[in-house]
Amino acid sequence: MRTFAARVFLLFLSSALVAQQSGPQPLGRAVQDGSLSANPLASPGQTPLASQTQKRKQPPAKPPAKHLKRTEIEGSMVGYIEPAAVQTAMRVRFDAGFDAPRPDRAEYFYAGTSAPGGGGTQRTLNFQQLYLYGEYAPLKRVSASFQLPFRWIQPTFVPGTVPAATVPTPPTGGGIGDVQAALKFAAIASPARALTLQLRGYFPSGNGTNGLGTNHFSIEPKLLFYQKLSSRAALEAEAGDTHPIGGTQYRATPSSSPRNFAADVAMYGLGPSYRLIQRDRYSIAPVFELAAWHVFGGLQTGSTNVVQSAGGINVLNAKLGARASFSNGSSIYAGYGRSLTSDIWYRNLFRIEYRQVF
């Protein structure tokens, strides 16, 4: 009996030793052999080095593409008043004006004469102007702009008491006008309201003798305003002054004191608009504008070709037009302007314009 029990004990002991030798390997040895990943998230059969290498090879996430941000203010509807929005934009504008009897008034349109003419004729003028305009806004409230004008004129003369040959007149023709550069600063810039200060400079690049420029520099500070009245209606306004630097010195006689042809001209205007048709991709807005000028001094050539004072003259024009605006930031304006006062810059003016806001 003792022998049998001893045999059973020895058999149990030998079985336990065999099971211990054939059991699982230690964790450290398994990792060393590469049979178990140290990263619990790694897939079966993948070593830690391979998992880390795969992570390094993943391309970095690309940042979202940056787009030009358009102005928060809805596009200006007016066609004659300067827009108050500070923005990046380009514009092509064409004017056709008729019956301008005093084009040298205060040297606002073109240069006057330095000597008396001789009298006896009355002049009028038809003209066309093409403007190429670009504006860039590096900041939300600041922009710079440049405008290049081209002008064509057709003067007409009514014979008087002396031959028209004695009258100093610009010839029919065309060419580059006085180029302009401006800076804008928005004191208020919100989707519903804008108040902007604009400072523009005029450079005498046009030939004043040929009626293409003023032959002097000018600076023009302006205050521009925009107010959104509703989802469809808006009101825009401006007020400013064109101040000449220099100007033609006129002498009635060789011994008389010189007088400056150029003078300050104040300009102010108001333009309500209403989006009559408003769709997702386009809108159409009729707009009515009133523009007024006051001449503080200077000279002009009168109806009998006699140079006379231009101080105190007031001019009022009414402008009626419409603008079609599209969802891509472009718009087209067409309008007509007519003088409402006896003193005029021109009797009639037609304007068409294309604008793109980026």
Image (cartoon, rainbow, N blue to C red):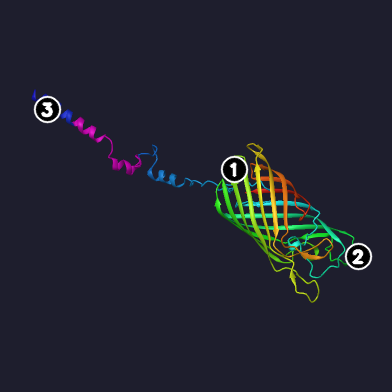
**Contact (Cβ within 8 Å) of mark 1 with mark 3:** no
Residues 28 and 173: in front is 173
The numbered mark, 1 or 2, whose residue comes first in the sequence reads 2
Q: Residues within 10 Å of mark 3 (few under 14, many from 20)?
A: few
Among the 4 quarters of the image, the one containing residue 14: top left
For the point 41% across and 43% down, which residue is it? Answer: 51
Return the residue at label 1: 229
Marks 3 & 2, CB-CB < 8 Å contact:
no
Secondary structure beneath disc 2? loop
169 relative to 190 in the view: left or right = right
- Disc 2 designates what residue? 163
Q: Position of residue 63 (x, y in %)?
A: 51, 47
**Secondary element at tag 3:** helix
Q: Can you say whether 127 is above or below 288 in the image?
A: below
Magenta part of the chain: 14-39
Q: What is the x, y in percent for residue 295?
A: 71, 60
The residue drawn where x is 24% and y is 35% is 21
Q: Quadrant of the N terminus?
A: top left
Q: Can you tell which quarter of the image residue 250 is in?
A: bottom right
* Residue 223 visible at all: yes
- The residue under label 3 is which amino acid type? Ala
Q: Amino acid at mark 2?
A: Pro
Q: Nearer the viewer, residue 149 or 255?
A: 255
Q: Position of residue 247 (x, y in %)?
A: 72, 68
Q: Position of residue 217 (x, y in %)?
A: 69, 66
Residue 251 magenta: no
User: Residue at the left extreme?
Assistant: 2
Q: Is residue 274 left or right of residue 165?
A: left
Confirm whether residue 79 shows in the render: no
Q: How far apart, in angstroms, are the residues tagged by discs 1 and 2?
A: 58 Å
Question: Residue 6 got which mark?
Answer: 3
